[in-house]
């Protein structure tokens, strides 16, 4: 089994920054990469960003490109999401996933961390 734990959410005003962190523990030897998805109230879960360890390839949703940066440490099975210039539409529960397929999903998920951006 793989355990995934996110941290770093919070309540901020528009224009502010937050950094989310995620760590995966357990049977992580198949971990090809990690990523972030989010789900706003009344909406489906959507892709935010992903990093594939081989070649350190990164992927972003158009809505966050230029504002969010994903980074991570393969050896530590950790991933970070630096979020700048936050907007009210970024308000959502942010989920970290392991063994990610960019824009699609992943095999293991965390419980999520709430990000709320006020206007």
Image (tube, rainbow, N blue to C red):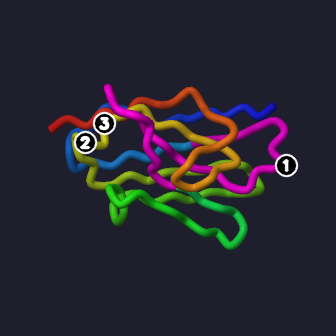
Relative to 39, is 58 on the left or the right? right
Q: Quadrant of the C terminus?
A: top left
* Disc 1 target residue: 29
Who comes first in sequence, dot 1 or dot 2? 1
> What residue do we see at 64% from left, 43% from top?
106
Q: Position of residue 45 (x, y in %)?
A: 44, 37
Distance (Cα) linking label 1 and label 2: 35 Å
Q: Position of residue 49 (x, y in %)?
A: 49, 54
Relative to 54, is 87 on the left or the right? left
* Disc 3 target residue: 91
Q: How many marks?
A: 3
* Disc 2 target residue: 89
Say which quarter of the image contains residue 11. Answer: top left
Q: Quadrant of the N terminus?
A: top right
Closer-to-camera residue (92/17): 92
**In the image, residue 76 above or below residue 26:** below
Q: Which residues fall within the magenta stretch?
A: 22-49
Say which quarter of the image contains residue 97. Answer: top right
> What residue do we see at 68% from left, 55% from top?
33
Packing grade of label 2 (10 A; few <14, some 14-19, many >=20) is: few
Who comes first in sequence, dot 3 or dot 1? 1
Say which quarter of the image contains residue 117. Answer: top left
> What residue do we see at 68% from left, 57% from top?
73
């Amino acid at each position: 089994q793989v355990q995934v734990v996110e941290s770093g959410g919070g309540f901020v005003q528009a224009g502010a920054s937050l950094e989310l962190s995620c760590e995966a523990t357990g049977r992580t030897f198949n971990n090809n990469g990690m990523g972030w998805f989010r789900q706003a109230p009344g909406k489906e879960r959507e892709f935010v960003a992903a990093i594939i360890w081989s070649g350190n390839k990164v992927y972003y949703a158009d809505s966050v490109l230029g504002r969010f940066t994903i980074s991570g440490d393969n050896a530590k099975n950790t991933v970070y999401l630096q979020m700048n210039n936050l907007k009210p539409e970024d308000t959502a529960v942010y989920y970290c996933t392991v063994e990610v397929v960019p824009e699609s999903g992943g095999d293991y998920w965390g419980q999520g961390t709430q990000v709320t951006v006020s206007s």
